[in-house]
Image: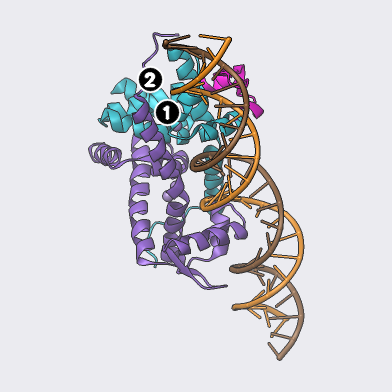
Chain colours: A purple, B cyan, C orange, D brown
Amino acid sequence: MTDTAPLPDEADQARTFTRLREAHASEVTEDYVELIADLIDSEGEARAVALANRFGVTPATVNNTVKRLERDGYVTSRPYRSIFLTDKGRALAEDCRERHQIVTQFLLALGVSADVAEADAEGIEHHVSAETLDAFRNFIATK
Amino acid sequence: MTDTAPLPDEADQARTFTRLREAHASEVTEDYVELIADLIDSEGEARAVALANRFGVTPATVNNTVKRLERDGYVTSRPYRSIFLTDKGRALAEDCRERHQIVTQFLLALGVSADVAEADAEGIEHHVSAETLDAFRNFIATK
DNA sequence: ACCTATTATTAGTCAAGACTAACTTTGCAA
DNA sequence: TTGCAAAGTTAGTCTTGACTAATAATAGGT
Ligand SMILES: [Mn+2]
Ligand SMILES: [Mn+2]
Ligand SMILES: [Mn+2]
Ligand SMILES: [Mn+2]
Protein backbone atom coordinates (compact mmCIF):
# COMPACT_ATOMS: atom_id res chain seq x y z
CA MET A 1 0.00 0.00 0.00
CA THR A 2 3.03 2.27 0.33
CA ASP A 3 6.71 1.81 -0.78
CA THR A 4 5.65 2.82 -4.29
CA ALA A 5 6.84 5.98 -6.05
CA PRO A 6 4.86 8.92 -4.65
CA LEU A 7 2.13 10.36 -6.84
CA PRO A 8 2.84 13.63 -8.64
CA ASP A 9 1.36 16.81 -7.25
CA GLU A 10 -2.35 16.87 -7.97
CA ALA A 11 -2.38 20.21 -9.80
CA ASP A 12 0.69 19.30 -11.88
CA GLN A 13 -0.88 16.06 -12.94
CA ALA A 14 -4.12 17.84 -13.85
CA ARG A 15 -2.13 20.26 -16.03
CA THR A 16 -0.42 17.36 -17.75
CA PHE A 17 -3.70 15.68 -18.62
CA THR A 18 -5.32 18.93 -19.67
CA ARG A 19 -2.46 19.57 -22.09
CA LEU A 20 -2.75 15.99 -23.30
CA ARG A 21 -6.42 16.54 -24.14
CA GLU A 22 -5.53 19.72 -25.98
CA ALA A 23 -2.94 17.82 -28.02
CA HIS A 24 -5.56 15.24 -28.94
CA ALA A 25 -7.91 17.94 -30.10
CA SER A 26 -5.39 19.09 -32.72
CA GLU A 27 -4.18 15.73 -33.95
CA VAL A 28 -6.70 15.25 -36.72
CA THR A 29 -6.15 18.79 -37.98
CA GLU A 30 -2.41 18.26 -38.01
CA ASP A 31 -2.58 14.97 -39.86
CA TYR A 32 -5.00 16.39 -42.43
CA VAL A 33 -3.00 19.50 -43.31
CA GLU A 34 0.16 17.43 -43.47
CA LEU A 35 -1.33 14.85 -45.81
CA ILE A 36 -3.01 17.53 -47.92
CA ALA A 37 0.39 19.22 -48.33
CA ASP A 38 2.00 15.88 -49.21
CA LEU A 39 -0.65 15.16 -51.84
CA ILE A 40 -0.36 18.61 -53.39
CA ASP A 41 3.41 18.28 -53.58
CA SER A 42 3.52 14.78 -54.96
CA GLU A 43 0.35 14.52 -57.03
CA GLY A 44 -0.42 18.15 -57.80
CA GLU A 45 -3.70 18.23 -55.91
CA ALA A 46 -5.47 16.89 -52.84
CA ARG A 47 -8.69 15.05 -53.68
CA ALA A 48 -11.09 13.87 -51.00
CA VAL A 49 -10.93 10.31 -52.32
CA ALA A 50 -7.17 10.21 -51.77
CA LEU A 51 -7.56 11.46 -48.20
CA ALA A 52 -10.23 8.84 -47.56
CA ASN A 53 -8.07 6.05 -48.95
CA ARG A 54 -4.94 7.11 -47.07
CA PHE A 55 -6.64 7.77 -43.73
CA GLY A 56 -8.71 4.60 -44.07
CA VAL A 57 -12.02 6.39 -43.52
CA THR A 58 -15.10 6.91 -45.68
CA PRO A 59 -15.55 9.88 -48.01
CA ALA A 60 -18.31 11.16 -45.73
CA THR A 61 -15.85 11.42 -42.86
CA VAL A 62 -13.40 13.34 -45.03
CA ASN A 63 -16.17 15.70 -46.03
CA ASN A 64 -17.08 16.45 -42.43
CA THR A 65 -13.48 16.97 -41.43
CA VAL A 66 -12.70 19.22 -44.39
CA LYS A 67 -15.67 21.39 -43.44
CA ARG A 68 -14.27 21.71 -39.94
CA LEU A 69 -10.83 22.58 -41.30
CA GLU A 70 -12.42 25.19 -43.53
CA ARG A 71 -14.40 26.61 -40.63
CA ASP A 72 -11.13 26.88 -38.69
CA GLY A 73 -9.29 28.58 -41.54
CA TYR A 74 -6.83 25.84 -42.56
CA VAL A 75 -8.20 24.99 -46.01
CA THR A 76 -10.47 26.22 -48.74
CA SER A 77 -12.67 24.01 -50.88
CA ARG A 78 -15.48 24.22 -53.40
CA PRO A 79 -18.03 21.47 -54.03
CA TYR A 80 -16.71 18.62 -56.15
CA ARG A 81 -13.28 20.24 -56.41
CA SER A 82 -9.98 19.50 -54.74
CA ILE A 83 -8.80 20.94 -51.44
CA PHE A 84 -6.36 23.84 -50.97
CA LEU A 85 -4.37 24.97 -47.96
CA THR A 86 -4.64 28.55 -46.70
CA ASP A 87 -1.47 30.32 -45.58
CA LYS A 88 -2.32 29.28 -42.05
CA GLY A 89 -2.84 25.69 -43.19
CA ARG A 90 0.39 25.62 -45.13
CA ALA A 91 2.34 27.02 -42.18
CA LEU A 92 0.91 24.37 -39.87
CA ALA A 93 1.64 21.66 -42.44
CA GLU A 94 5.28 22.75 -42.67
CA ASP A 95 5.73 22.65 -38.91
CA CYS A 96 4.06 19.25 -38.65
CA ARG A 97 6.06 17.90 -41.53
CA GLU A 98 9.33 18.89 -39.95
CA ARG A 99 8.37 17.55 -36.54
CA HIS A 100 7.08 14.32 -38.07
CA GLN A 101 10.27 13.84 -40.02
CA ILE A 102 12.46 14.39 -36.97
CA VAL A 103 10.48 11.87 -34.95
CA THR A 104 10.75 9.29 -37.73
CA GLN A 105 14.49 9.89 -38.20
CA PHE A 106 15.00 9.66 -34.47
CA LEU A 107 13.29 6.28 -34.21
CA LEU A 108 15.33 5.01 -37.15
CA ALA A 109 18.53 6.30 -35.52
CA LEU A 110 17.54 4.39 -32.37
CA GLY A 111 17.44 1.19 -34.40
CA VAL A 112 13.71 0.80 -34.91
CA SER A 113 12.73 -0.80 -38.24
CA ALA A 114 11.40 1.44 -41.00
CA ASP A 115 7.81 0.16 -40.93
CA VAL A 116 7.48 0.48 -37.19
CA ALA A 117 9.23 3.86 -37.12
CA GLU A 118 6.73 5.19 -39.66
CA ALA A 119 3.78 3.81 -37.73
CA ASP A 120 4.86 4.90 -34.25
CA ALA A 121 5.91 8.35 -35.44
CA GLU A 122 2.38 9.01 -36.66
CA GLY A 123 1.15 8.92 -33.07
CA ILE A 124 4.21 10.08 -31.15
CA GLU A 125 4.69 13.28 -33.19
CA HIS A 126 1.65 14.90 -31.58
CA HIS A 127 2.99 14.48 -28.06
CA VAL A 128 6.54 15.72 -28.41
CA SER A 129 7.31 19.05 -26.77
CA ALA A 130 9.85 21.51 -28.16
CA GLU A 131 12.37 20.38 -25.56
CA THR A 132 11.98 16.70 -26.41
CA LEU A 133 12.12 17.45 -30.11
CA ASP A 134 15.44 19.20 -29.53
CA ALA A 135 16.72 16.16 -27.67
CA PHE A 136 15.65 14.02 -30.66
CA ARG A 137 17.40 16.36 -33.09
CA ASN A 138 20.49 16.27 -30.99
CA PHE A 139 20.53 12.50 -30.83
CA ILE A 140 20.18 12.24 -34.62
CA ALA A 141 23.06 14.69 -35.10
CA THR A 142 25.30 12.91 -32.57
CA LYS A 143 24.13 9.45 -33.59
CA MET B 1 5.50 19.43 -57.31
CA THR B 2 7.87 16.48 -57.36
CA ASP B 3 11.41 16.00 -55.89
CA THR B 4 9.77 15.38 -52.51
CA ALA B 5 9.93 12.03 -50.68
CA PRO B 6 7.40 9.70 -52.30
CA LEU B 7 4.17 9.05 -50.42
CA PRO B 8 3.87 5.73 -48.58
CA ASP B 9 1.78 3.00 -50.16
CA GLU B 10 -1.89 3.90 -49.80
CA ALA B 11 -2.93 0.69 -48.04
CA ASP B 12 0.05 0.84 -45.66
CA GLN B 13 -0.76 4.38 -44.70
CA ALA B 14 -4.42 3.49 -44.14
CA ARG B 15 -3.34 0.67 -41.83
CA THR B 16 -1.13 3.07 -39.89
CA PHE B 17 -3.95 5.54 -39.34
CA THR B 18 -6.44 2.81 -38.49
CA ARG B 19 -4.09 1.51 -35.81
CA LEU B 20 -3.59 5.06 -34.59
CA ARG B 21 -7.34 5.48 -34.14
CA GLU B 22 -7.47 2.19 -32.25
CA ALA B 23 -4.70 3.42 -29.95
CA HIS B 24 -6.65 6.59 -29.28
CA ALA B 25 -9.72 4.60 -28.39
CA SER B 26 -7.85 2.86 -25.55
CA GLU B 27 -5.95 5.84 -24.15
CA VAL B 28 -8.52 6.96 -21.64
CA THR B 29 -9.02 3.41 -20.39
CA GLU B 30 -5.28 2.98 -19.97
CA ASP B 31 -4.80 6.23 -18.09
CA TYR B 32 -7.76 5.49 -15.80
CA VAL B 33 -6.71 1.98 -14.78
CA GLU B 34 -3.15 3.18 -14.27
CA LEU B 35 -4.18 6.08 -12.05
CA ILE B 36 -6.67 3.93 -10.16
CA ALA B 37 -3.87 1.46 -9.45
CA ASP B 38 -1.57 4.28 -8.35
CA LEU B 39 -4.19 5.67 -5.99
CA ILE B 40 -4.94 2.29 -4.49
CA ASP B 41 -1.24 1.66 -3.94
CA SER B 42 -0.39 5.02 -2.47
CA GLU B 43 -3.59 6.09 -0.73
CA GLY B 44 -5.31 2.78 -0.08
CA GLU B 45 -8.31 3.52 -2.29
CA ALA B 46 -9.36 5.22 -5.50
CA ARG B 47 -12.10 7.82 -4.96
CA ALA B 48 -13.83 9.52 -7.84
CA VAL B 49 -12.92 12.94 -6.47
CA ALA B 50 -9.22 12.09 -6.64
CA LEU B 51 -9.56 10.94 -10.24
CA ALA B 52 -11.40 14.14 -11.11
CA ASN B 53 -8.75 16.32 -9.47
CA ARG B 54 -5.84 14.49 -11.04
CA PHE B 55 -7.29 14.25 -14.54
CA GLY B 56 -8.50 17.84 -14.35
CA VAL B 57 -12.09 16.94 -15.25
CA THR B 58 -15.41 17.21 -13.41
CA PRO B 59 -16.81 14.47 -11.18
CA ALA B 60 -19.57 13.93 -13.74
CA THR B 61 -16.99 13.02 -16.36
CA VAL B 62 -15.33 10.57 -13.98
CA ASN B 63 -18.69 8.98 -13.28
CA ASN B 64 -19.41 8.46 -16.96
CA THR B 65 -15.98 7.04 -17.63
CA VAL B 66 -16.07 4.70 -14.65
CA LYS B 67 -19.39 3.34 -15.90
CA ARG B 68 -17.79 2.62 -19.24
CA LEU B 69 -14.82 0.94 -17.58
CA GLU B 70 -17.22 -1.15 -15.55
CA ARG B 71 -19.20 -2.08 -18.65
CA ASP B 72 -15.93 -3.16 -20.28
CA GLY B 73 -14.85 -5.24 -17.29
CA TYR B 74 -11.91 -3.19 -16.00
CA VAL B 75 -13.34 -1.99 -12.69
CA THR B 76 -16.11 -2.59 -10.20
CA SER B 77 -17.86 0.10 -8.24
CA ARG B 78 -20.89 0.63 -6.01
CA PRO B 79 -22.72 3.93 -5.59
CA TYR B 80 -20.93 6.37 -3.29
CA ARG B 81 -18.07 3.92 -2.75
CA SER B 82 -14.54 3.84 -4.08
CA ILE B 83 -13.43 2.12 -7.28
CA PHE B 84 -11.77 -1.30 -7.56
CA LEU B 85 -9.85 -2.95 -10.37
CA THR B 86 -10.88 -6.33 -11.71
CA ASP B 87 -8.17 -8.86 -12.53
CA LYS B 88 -8.38 -7.66 -16.12
CA GLY B 89 -8.08 -4.04 -14.99
CA ARG B 90 -5.16 -4.78 -12.73
CA ALA B 91 -3.34 -6.66 -15.49
CA LEU B 92 -3.82 -3.75 -17.89
CA ALA B 93 -2.70 -1.29 -15.22
CA GLU B 94 0.50 -3.26 -14.63
CA ASP B 95 1.34 -3.31 -18.33
CA CYS B 96 0.62 0.40 -18.70
CA ARG B 97 2.58 1.25 -15.61
CA GLU B 98 5.64 -0.57 -16.87
CA ARG B 99 5.42 0.95 -20.34
CA HIS B 100 4.84 4.40 -18.89
CA GLN B 101 7.83 4.08 -16.63
CA ILE B 102 10.11 2.97 -19.44
CA VAL B 103 9.05 5.89 -21.63
CA THR B 104 9.68 8.35 -18.80
CA GLN B 105 13.06 6.83 -17.95
CA PHE B 106 13.98 6.87 -21.61
CA LEU B 107 13.23 10.58 -21.99
CA LEU B 108 15.21 11.31 -18.84
CA ALA B 109 18.12 9.26 -20.16
CA LEU B 110 17.97 11.30 -23.36
CA GLY B 111 18.48 14.45 -21.31
CA VAL B 112 14.92 15.77 -21.18
CA SER B 113 14.06 17.61 -17.95
CA ALA B 114 11.93 15.82 -15.37
CA ASP B 115 8.81 17.95 -15.77
CA VAL B 116 8.79 17.69 -19.54
CA ALA B 117 9.63 13.99 -19.49
CA GLU B 118 6.64 13.36 -17.22
CA ALA B 119 4.34 15.42 -19.41
CA ASP B 120 5.45 14.04 -22.79
CA ALA B 121 5.48 10.45 -21.54
CA GLU B 122 1.80 10.71 -20.69
CA GLY B 123 0.99 11.07 -24.39
CA ILE B 124 3.84 9.15 -26.01
CA GLU B 125 3.29 5.97 -23.98
CA HIS B 126 0.12 5.14 -25.90
CA HIS B 127 1.85 5.16 -29.27
CA VAL B 128 4.92 3.09 -28.57
CA SER B 129 5.00 -0.37 -30.15
CA ALA B 130 6.69 -3.38 -28.56
CA GLU B 131 9.65 -2.92 -30.87
CA THR B 132 10.13 0.73 -30.03
CA LEU B 133 9.69 0.00 -26.32
CA ASP B 134 12.50 -2.54 -26.61
CA ALA B 135 14.69 0.09 -28.27
CA PHE B 136 13.90 2.45 -25.38
CA ARG B 137 14.75 -0.22 -22.82
CA ASN B 138 17.96 -0.96 -24.60
CA PHE B 139 18.96 2.69 -24.70
CA ILE B 140 18.30 3.07 -20.97
CA ALA B 141 20.41 -0.01 -20.24
CA THR B 142 23.27 1.14 -22.49
CA LYS B 143 22.88 4.79 -21.50
C1' DA C 1 -28.19 12.68 16.91
C1' DC C 2 -27.75 16.19 13.54
C1' DC C 3 -25.76 19.66 10.52
C1' DT C 4 -23.11 20.61 7.07
C1' DA C 5 -19.40 20.11 3.89
C1' DT C 6 -17.66 16.88 0.83
C1' DT C 7 -18.51 13.54 -2.40
C1' DA C 8 -21.18 11.22 -5.81
C1' DT C 9 -25.01 10.75 -9.06
C1' DT C 10 -28.27 12.05 -12.53
C1' DA C 11 -30.16 14.53 -16.36
C1' DG C 12 -29.46 17.12 -20.18
C1' DT C 13 -26.34 19.30 -23.64
C1' DC C 14 -22.56 19.58 -26.93
C1' DA C 15 -18.63 18.77 -30.39
C1' DA C 16 -15.63 15.59 -32.59
C1' DG C 17 -15.21 11.97 -35.35
C1' DA C 18 -16.72 7.91 -37.05
C1' DC C 19 -20.40 5.18 -39.89
C1' DT C 20 -24.26 3.85 -43.73
C1' DA C 21 -27.36 4.81 -47.30
C1' DA C 22 -29.13 7.64 -50.68
C1' DC C 23 -28.34 11.12 -53.83
C1' DT C 24 -25.77 14.35 -57.08
C1' DT C 25 -22.10 15.88 -59.87
C1' DT C 26 -18.28 15.30 -62.81
C1' DG C 27 -15.69 13.78 -66.51
C1' DC C 28 -14.17 10.25 -69.67
C1' DA C 29 -14.78 6.64 -73.26
C1' DA C 30 -17.23 4.75 -76.55
C1' DT D 1 -22.90 13.38 -77.09
C1' DT D 2 -24.44 10.87 -73.95
C1' DG D 3 -24.11 7.37 -70.47
C1' DC D 4 -21.87 5.41 -66.76
C1' DA D 5 -18.39 4.87 -63.22
C1' DA D 6 -15.95 7.42 -60.03
C1' DA D 7 -16.07 11.07 -56.88
C1' DG D 8 -18.35 13.97 -53.77
C1' DT D 9 -22.31 15.44 -50.88
C1' DT D 10 -26.09 15.10 -47.67
C1' DA D 11 -28.91 13.28 -44.04
C1' DG D 12 -29.25 10.66 -40.22
C1' DT D 13 -27.13 7.82 -36.49
C1' DC D 14 -23.75 6.43 -32.99
C1' DT D 15 -20.04 6.57 -29.25
C1' DT D 16 -16.78 8.99 -26.67
C1' DG D 17 -15.73 12.28 -23.68
C1' DA D 18 -16.39 16.63 -22.12
C1' DC D 19 -19.53 20.20 -19.61
C1' DT D 20 -23.30 22.46 -16.17
C1' DA D 21 -26.86 22.35 -12.90
C1' DA D 22 -29.58 20.06 -9.78
C1' DT D 23 -30.03 16.46 -6.55
C1' DA D 24 -28.69 12.84 -3.26
C1' DA D 25 -25.79 10.36 -0.09
C1' DT D 26 -22.08 10.07 3.20
C1' DA D 27 -19.36 11.12 7.06
C1' DG D 28 -17.20 13.98 10.52
C1' DG D 29 -17.52 17.41 14.14
C1' DT D 30 -20.08 19.36 17.62
MN1 LIG E 1 1.97 13.34 -39.27
MN1 LIG F 1 0.12 11.94 -36.86
MN1 LIG G 1 0.15 6.56 -18.16
MN1 LIG H 1 -1.12 8.45 -20.74
- Which of the 4 image quadrants contains residue A7? top left
**For the residue labelled by badge 2, is the local secondary structure a helix, a strand or a loop?**
loop
Q: Residue at x 47, y 63 (%)?
A: A71
Q: Are marks 2 and 1 in contact (CB under 8 Å)?
A: yes
Mark seen at residue A7: 2
Residue B19 in the image: state x and y as whole percent: 55, 41
Mark seen at residue B54: 1
Q: Nearer the viewer, residue D22 or B109?
A: D22
Tell me if mark 2 has few (under 14), some (14-19) or many (20+) residues whose alpha carbon lies within 10 angstroms of its own. some
Residue B52 part of the magenta-drawn span: no
Q: Nearer the viewer, residue B15 or B26?
A: B26
- What's drawn in magenta, residue-wise? B69-96
Label 1 chain ID: B
Left or right for B139, reference C18: left
Q: Residue at x 53, y 38 (%)?
A: B23
Q: Residue at x 45, y 21 (%)?
A: B98
Q: Nearer the viewer, residue A35 or B93?
A: B93
Q: Residue at x 39, y 61 (%)?
A: A89
Amino acid type shown at disc 2: Leu
Q: Is residue A63 above or below residue A25?
A: below
State whether residue A114 appears in this view: no
Query: How many dots with numbers?
Result: 2
**For the residue labelled by badge 1, is the local secondary structure a helix, a strand or a loop?**
helix
